[in-house]
Image: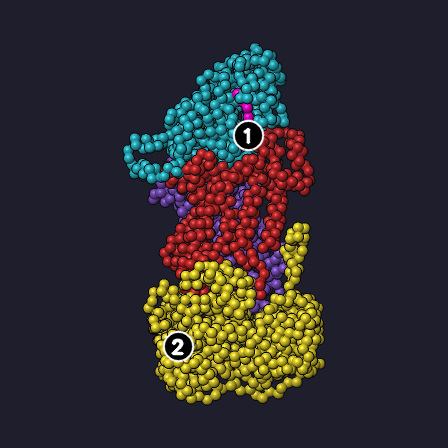
Amino acid sequence: MSGAAPSPPTDPLLEIRNLTIRYRDGGRQINAVSDVSFALKPGGSLAIVGESGSGKSSVAGAVLDFLGPGAEVSGAIRFEGQDIAGLSPAQRRRMLGRRIGAVFQDPFTALNPALRVGRQIAEPMVEHLGLALPEALGRAEIALREMGIERAAEVACAFPHQLSGGMKQRALIAAALACGPSLLILDEPTTALDVTVEAQILRLLSRLRRETGVSLLFISHNLGVVRRLCDDVAVMYASQLVELGDVRSVLERPAHPYSKGLLASRPPLAAASRGSRLAAIAGQMPTDPTPDAGCVFAPRCPFHELRCSNAPQLLTIAPDGHQVRCWKNGVLGPWPRQAVVDIEEPVFHRGDTLVNVTGLGKTFDKRARFTAWRLSVADGRPLLYRRPGRVPAVNDVTFSISPGEVLGLVGESGCGKSTLGRLLLQLLRQSHGSVEFDGADIARLPTQALAPFRRQAQIVFQNVGSSLNPRLSVGEALERPLALFNLVEPRERTRRVEALLEMVRLPGAYRKRFPHQLSGGERQRVAIARALATEPRFVVCDEPASALDVSVQATIVNLLADLRDAFALAYLFISHDLAVVAQLSDRIAVMYRGKICEIGTAAEVLAPPYHPYTEILLASAADDEPPAVPQGASTELAVGHPGCVFAARCPHHLGSICATKPPPLRVQSASHAIACHLDTAQLALSRLGA
Amino acid sequence: MRDASLQTRITRRSALKMASAAALPALIRPVRAAEPSTLRVAFAIQPATLDPQKMRVGGVDYNYVYNCFSRLTTQDPLLQVQPDLATSWEATEDLKAWTFHLRPGVKFHNGKPLDASDIVFTFKRILDKDVGSVLRVNFSMVDSIDVVDPLTVRFNLSIPYADLPAAAAAYQAAIVSESTLDTVTVHPIGTGPFRFVEYRPGDQLVLERNPDYFLPGVPKLDRVIIRIIPEFTTSVAALESGAVDAVFDLPPEQVDKLKQSTVARVEEVQAGRWQGITWNCEMKPFDDPRVRRAFNKMIDKPAITEIAMFGHATPTLTPIPPFHPYFRKDIPIGGADIAGAKKLLAEAAIPEGFTLEMYVPGSNPPRERLATAFRDAAKQAGINVQLRIAPPDKFFAEMEGKVPFAADGFYGRATPDLMVYPWYHSTGSWNNTLWHYKNPEVDKVLDAARTTADKNEQAKLYGRFQEMLLDDSPGSVIYVQNFACGFSNKVHDVVVSPLMLMDFSKAALTA
Amino acid sequence: MAAYVVQRLGAAMVIMVAMSVLVFLATHALPSNAAALILGQYSTPETQAALEHRLGFDLPLPVQYWRWASHMLQGDMGQSFEMERPVAPILWDALGRSAILAVCSMIVVSTAGLALGVVAAVWRGRWPDHAASIFTYFGVSLPEFYWGLVLILIFGSTLHLLPSSGYANLAEGLGPFIAHLVLPVSTLTLTLLAHVTRLTRSSMMEALDSVYVKVARARGLPERLVILRHALRNALIPSITVLAQDFGFLIGGIVAVETVFAYPGLGRMLVGSLARQDLPMMQAAILVLTGVYCVANLTADLLYGVVNPRIRYGGSIG
Amino acid sequence: MAIRRRRRLPLSLVVGGALVLALVAISALAQWIAPYPYDQMHIRDRFLPPNLTYLAGTDEYGRDVFSRLLIGSQLSLALGGTATLISMGIGVPLGMLAGYRRGATDELIMRTLDVMLAFPPIMLVLLILAVTPPSLLKTAIAIGVLAVAPIARVTRSVTLDLMSGEFMEAARARGERLRYMLMRELLPNIWPVLIVEASLRVVFAVLLGAVLSFLGFGVQPPAADWGLMISNGRAFVDTAPWISLAPGIAMSVTVIAISLVGDGLREVLDPRIGGR
């Protein structure tokens, strides 16, 4: 509707009408998709957005005929004018790859590890276009080049494990488009990727769309990503389509309360005050929605009235042309935000430090293992050598955290941020440098002497699936720290556990539950309660909200903020998501390949002057179409060269100095420093796309 | 095979057999007709050694030696001493010097002629302690051996000994040549009816006809292949399917089964091989004669014989077998007297529930059954017997004679003297290994019997010996086993001897 | 890959040395008096001592080990106490015959096991799956010797279809050669099949559930290609390790099967030498069997490297 | 890892479980169920086929095969159980330690076990049993030792899996001691996998015990585990097949029942079914 040239009304490429999908689970039937209808015109792009369990992937599955025998599908799926739901499985299979391409979420497992990449791209061409394998392989190489891969010939001959995640996803897109399909189904294609890589893939997709005219059906949980790629958006909640319309109008003027809540839950990419909280959606999505009984969102809806639960909600046309499944039809107030008592912005002084890290480094080598020894016969003379150590995971890091202060730590996966968090807690021992806690150098302490420190420093993890021992009840998990540190009399413990649960806003009765009986958000609350049971002063939060849906993520971030204020906690808040970090942090450190390249208050880091890397992170995370970010040929510089770790990817690369000399620390203010060869003036100037 | 099934009534089984035989493609037709004059015999154990003087266990070793080598004398199936390499022999009046006259013109398989020096070498080898031949004790009375002339040797003895010609028929006394001794374990050279061709341990031993054999017209077979098949189920199946032509020493449970066969037959003879229970008179509790008597009373020989051998054995008094002329048929071999045994045990102050370990050399089901049956009897008498099955070689090397209580058994010997003297005379070799039995009366009788050449006198003395042992025996010789072999119906004239032997020299096959 | 090969070879060598020490120590820990065993009942302490000296049993253990091991390395396995023949030729003969049995069984087990496993995984939860699992349950529920007896009874004694014992040289013709192998190989197959089948089934199911198979389907490949090219290729990789492991069980099974079928192989030789406490024979047989197993594992490791591109092609290309 | 409640129990687990319970009950009560003493001979009733007096017939001594089967089940199950207990008792702590400590401890333990694994399974047992007089306990120990390495390997791999679980790190962040980590955090999560593994091992031990009895390295008569019964009965396999058939069927049923339980448990514990 927006970018596409005006055209006479054409038949839709893909039209889905009254699609309903039910799964049998034991004796029960569960609605995965209820009565969903939409159409995608040729060359168009439609996003289906929703949280996990909303049914969005089932819609894609129905188009691809991937639902398996357990699913009961009804309704019509018309593709290129043909009702494909009525075709035989073999006929539908033949349509895949040729007319419909698909790319899935996890590029790391989507390529067959035993086949060369080129072969996997050539495969559909051999199958559908009848090409001979050598010819198809040649075309595969061309296709890879099309995807922006420079050493296409080399990549075509490689096995998947030799490629990076972004490269894999490019190869998968190349394979999906190999036969020139008219429809490309993208099921969360960038979710598993780093934010900078995600930006590149999105750019690639929008270029391909422009160049080939392929239509996109894009499944995502991320509204921001959707804006960059799609014309139309369909929001799904609990098996239903709740809102459908033009991307800009839906994102700017959401008409359904859920869409509104979803948008409000996303933290803005800006420094937040201590008193600011995200707008969260209370409660959780029903696992077995029953749309016939009334609005499925009613229990979580702040605008709901008695009338909402009386009858099923119908899809109606909202004033600005999009469809909404809400009788209020867009006439809503603003999404309510959590009220916070005014909190004074704390002032931290360099002097009062809780955690002080100096020259901290960690290199994982396998020195302890004698199998690290290798016999080399390469040069004719047998030689016993040890496999060289890896690049340091954390490299000469220095910073401090004051009591009650939140330091955000941002970086891509593998940059060493989690290792750094574990070093602070001495869960890993450093290779060099020191960690002082409350004035004591805990890095020199033997393990047995760490007990008092352990009580005061705790950790909350990312993975809600494994953060709680599945064999321990919530009560047992929370009692253990109390017992271990002898904090509470045994008789008092139950009451204390209930108090802890209440603190993280869970009912006291939850202490009898086991982790598998809790939702992801609830588990994370228990994990937070467990970390706080010892009344610590410092908590490492290692991506505590990253694995959760947006609406739940907001509640956890809010909870952490509340606890910070209530108990004057200091956090090291680790995340790959700059926006979330910004929401909670007083200061932010940006990490790349084991080094901190920029550190400063949240406002300072989010505004120029930037470190070039910060700049790319910010640009990639922006909702708008991201600027072209140079990829950089990362292998051209030897790993572990003495220069700037970011040199290989740096858009402002100054030449050999970057690779040979460690960058100097450019102090911008008392709290803001940037490690870069560019001087302050240049740093302030260089703005991508500006 | 097909002829046989055609002759019999067409039952479902045979119909199936024919159908399947017809359906089977020629490629995997399993039973290829062997060349007419190759005899394939299954043995359960492989030869331990090919060196005749060093053989210890019987079975395949004896059969190989018998067919590959010759001795001075041999014994016929009636245990009578017959000429082999020696055509005649005589003793001095005092039985202290024996002269053997050799058959002229005998050649070893490598063509070397046999002469008296080979005999002397062989017997000196037997008497050499370092060789460790089990036969040494049997010839302990030999002082010296002289070459009288190339075809005559003389044995000079320290004591009168009537049974030297029979003793010389022992398999370990097979004549070897000094010149080929170094290869005796790999490629033995003898003078027997068959020549050694090859031996693949665990698999087979191949013999071929010796064309220069000293007896005219034998052997008839071109080849004898001794196959090693440890499981009798397997070897009997092989016999029935024609994969082998004969099976050596069938255990009793296979005898009755094979007797039903239409393609094979069993030849069974009474033999002197005995099995029984030994107790060591020097060890507790058997140092008390009352205990020995009590144990004797527990044993119901006929019942144990039936359980252990299913009727393919005969209860006996001593190692002298019931078919021997000297056997005391008039002494009844009765059942057990549990009450009497209990009384004796009480007198010897052996408490009720006394526990005793009984060692049993394994790999011999009848012997295990014998032990199990005895255990049952002992239980009734209030003795708790725990069986300890040991690998045979381990048993013979480490347990035999060193434990108070065991089940054991021995091959039959050629003469009454060889049958009993080593076991019951206080200087007897086996006696001093096994049970240390000391009875001066018995010594006197045995000494008298071995030095007399008068058969009637001998019969009387051995008869008395059997009576003397009724009560006071240092063990119980329960039965002598039959010796049974299975033969395919196309095999003829294999002589089955009570000495556990198959003589292939006259054997022939029909197509 | 080269580093991988060197590493695996090194590990195999270390294991062989460790094993030889173990075998040597275990056999020398035998409480039996070897000299008494050799010389029999009538030996005297003097003759025993003389023999012990001749055999070097009076030397310190490390010296004995060194002598033994260095002889072994030169292929000299000593003389059988009992037979007084050199062990080596007997052993190699027996090994050759066992190898024929083992290799045939491995071929049958791996092809049948893989086929059954794939069928069961593809038709999971339906009758081919159930049939395969019942069949394999049945096979593995009884030890080899029992199946051996049953097969002999059916095919040897009753039907007279197949020879129930021994072995035939290839020289005796292909027919008898194969015929003699059918029953022992079937017996071994029956007991080993379950393991391979089940593992193939589960790794195949895992492969079929994987994302790359989903992607392959999304490329519109016919199911046959999806199964054979995409799923099976990956499912094969773990099967290699299992087959190597099964080789160990095969060696165990061979000991029993060779006894039942009177198959003149190494397993039977080993059991015989154990029963007779024939030290050199025992040591050589155990060492050779473990060596064979070691080689099998090594082969599996190397094959694993060849099949698994992660090992064959190490580094990333960025 | 968590047991999915509400999930229906697989048929294999129900059937196998019922069979195993029945077998254990029968063997526990064998002395009372058995119609005759296991070693009582009825000389006149030898080789009787199954009939009303002797439910499974009689053997070559006229002993009641059915009674012997019942008593034999005790030995076979005791052998399987003891061997498995031994291997679990050694293998589980070793595997947990190796997986938990990693580094040099891991290397030391696993490389040692590699050497053990490099022995073909039966070799070690034969060696042990050949050099010393046989007894049931020794057989059990030998078989148990044999299974130490595979059990330790499984335990280690599960431990390694769990080590990446963040609850383990949370416990370490509390400064928990080794004992608590292994016993309270790890073990409760490992045991479901171990039960599956144990069922495999019991089967393996019962079968291997039978083979050893067959080769003459097993229990001593007249006591008879099923392996020895089969071994003794094989001489009569065509004239009195029930003597070896009955223990064969009993063993087959036992093995299948235990395998069913193992497979059923695996299905319950891991719906994707990970094979080993």
Against A543, residue A119 (above or below) is above
Residue B314's quadrant in the figure? top left
Kind of element beneath mark 2: loop
Amino acid carrying label 2: it is Lys
Q: Colour of chain D?
A: purple
Residue at 36%, 30% (x, y): give it.
B263
Chain letter for the residue marked with disc 1 in the picture: B
For the magenta stretch, what is the residue range? Answer: B186-191
Q: Which chain is yellow?
A: A
Label 1: how many residues lie within 10 Å, few (<14), some (14-19) or many (20+)? many
Q: Is residue B187 magenta?
A: yes
Chain letter for the residue marked with disc 2 in the picture: A
Residue A449 badge: none
Q: Report which residue position mark 2 lands on.
A: A41
Q: Report which residue position mark 1 lands on.
A: B49
Report whether residue D72 is seen: no
Q: Which chain is red?
A: C
Viewer-side residue, D213 vs A683: A683
